[in-house]
Image (tube, coloured by chain):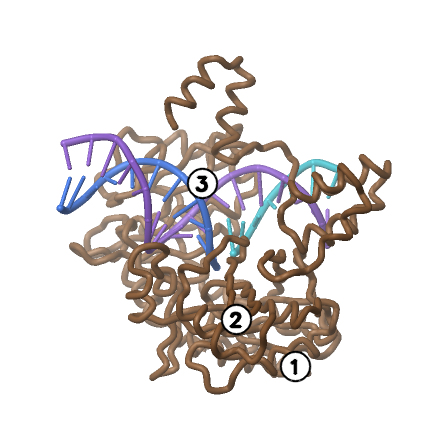
Chain colours: A brown, B blue, C cyan, D purple
Amino acid sequence: KISLLIDLLANATPIEARYIARLPIGRLRLGVGDPTVLDALSLMHKGDKSDRELLESKYNLCSDLGLIAKVYAQDPSSLSKFTMVPFTPVRPALAERLPSADEILEKMGGKCIAEAKYDGFRLQIHLKGNRVEIFSRRLERMTEMLPEVVDAVRNELDCDEVIFEGEALAYNEATGEFYPFQQTIQRKRKHGVEEKSAEMPLKLFAFDILYINGEDVTHKPFTQRRKLLESIIPKDSKTLSLSESYLVKSSQEIEAHFNDFISRGLEGLMAKDLNAPYIAGARKFAWVKLKRSYRNELSDTIDLVIIGYFAGRGARAKFKFGGVLGAVYDPHTDMFYSIAKVGSGFSEEQMSELEKLLSAIKTKKPNARINSIMEPTYWVEPKYVITVTADEITRSPVHTCGKTGNSPGYALRFPRMIGDLRTDKRPEDATTVDEIIEMYKMQKRTEVSSEGEEV
DNA sequence: CATGGCTGCCC
DNA sequence: ATTCTGC
DNA sequence: GCAGAATGGGCAGCCATG
């Protein structure tokens, strides 16, 4: 591969070399994405965007944009041949986010379905006759990874032909306990698949249906689709079940279910409009997700010391700043231990400011009070403190916070900076290793009251 | 034959 | 996954 | 609000290295 690239690059002009480099790494940075291509196709034949909607609806059924473009370019009328059909993945419906039960209920018009949000793999499952194919959220084939799901779908589903969706995760049938995502993702993809499947079987929680017995049902209202789903999922299956689902008519009910879900180790709550169709390929308010981190910005934040920073790439190159390496403090050793890279939540102004401040305190080697396996582009003196929020604390093979000997440390899942530089905090005022360990122990059992305060 | 670096994918 | 920015 | 492009932790798998 390298030698092929060498040949290409050696014979390229500088501008060609730029795109020869960008193409294989998939970072073309053209400012053009799928929706722009759909607009362009419509403009090609119609001179305006009047075919955009049609093109998009076909793209949602057939995620091969190249094929859509080819067919449409040759003959716009032949787009009608694209219909929903088993074994061609459908672009999944996505959910918006809202920070509170009140806002969700208002958006939903006073009532909605509240479902558990499971922290696993989102699966789109296609069955026809004896054949089963399973696709990931990004529409990659995952069939071989999931033998127990394939078997259950093939043998237990009360249906011959269907496309439906669910969340699959590692689950302890005996205790009813949901395992964390880190367990679920240990699923093998190629070698030892059967062994892993037997050791830690996944359970599928079905939450929507798109197609059944030759019919596209995405235009039916959600409540009708749910009934169809209930009719095909067996009651006594070890592997297949329905997502937990409640009709709610008040924000208090949403809160109560949310707290219950969190206390049982689930990721949050999904609110769904009773009447909405399945809106393929779109992030629309038919589905709204609620997670702890969307609302918890006051009670669950973490103050990190910046111990290094990264050179930005692409749109961040001009700021010479891509993010920081954050650490927590341990008063016992008077050292700073890495816990997360933080690359999200900065405005452009903040990136400029941080680069200016941090470049002034760069060091060649890490300060003697820094303990980190991760290496930033530039080390800096432990001086500045930022506030960060995250969804979860996980055990980490790469961060040194809480790491002892061969045992893992701790890290933050989905870290992002909130607010501004904490000029009121010294590095020693940052969150401590002990506090992180305490938060790790508490996180699953922590409930949130309707006022958003920890209980 | 063990392992570090890298990639692609999950969230 | 989350977040910011130009339109 | 859409579209696009930055960025996170961490897993399995591949391959070169030693």
Could you tell me how many numbered marks the image carries?
A: 3
Q: Is residue A31 left or right of residue A429?
A: right
Between circles 3 and 1, the one closer to the viewer is 1
Q: What residue does disc 2 label?
A: A117
Q: Chain of mark 1?
A: A
Helix, strand or loop status at disc 1: helix
Q: Are marks 3 and 1 on the same chain?
A: yes
Q: Name the residue at 55% across, 72% down.
A: A269
Q: Quadrant of the C terminus of chain A?
A: bottom left
Q: What residue does disc 1 label?
A: A227
Q: CA distance from mark 2 to mark 3?
A: 30 Å
Q: Chain of mark 2?
A: A
- Label 1 close to label 2 by CB (< 8 Å): no
Q: Position of residue A110 (x, y in %)?
A: 73, 78
Q: Is residue A105 visible from the viewing direction of this image?
A: yes
Between circles 2 and 3, the one closer to the viewer is 2
- Say if A287 sits above or below A26 in the image: below
Amino acid type, label 3:
Gly
Q: CA distance from mark 3 to mark 1?
A: 47 Å
- Say if A15 sits above or below A38 in the image: above
Amino acid type, label 2:
Lys
Q: Are marks 2 and 3 on the same chain?
A: yes
Q: Name the residue at 54% across, 54% down.
A: A139
Q: CA distance from mark 1 to mark 2?
A: 19 Å
In the displayed orientation, state which residue is furthest to the bottom. A236
Of residues D11 and A164, the one nearer the viewer is: A164
Kindly indicate the quadrant of the structure image that contains residue A331.
bottom left
Q: Name the residue at 65% across, 68% down.
A: A211
Label placed on residue A323: 3
Amino acid type, label 1:
Lys
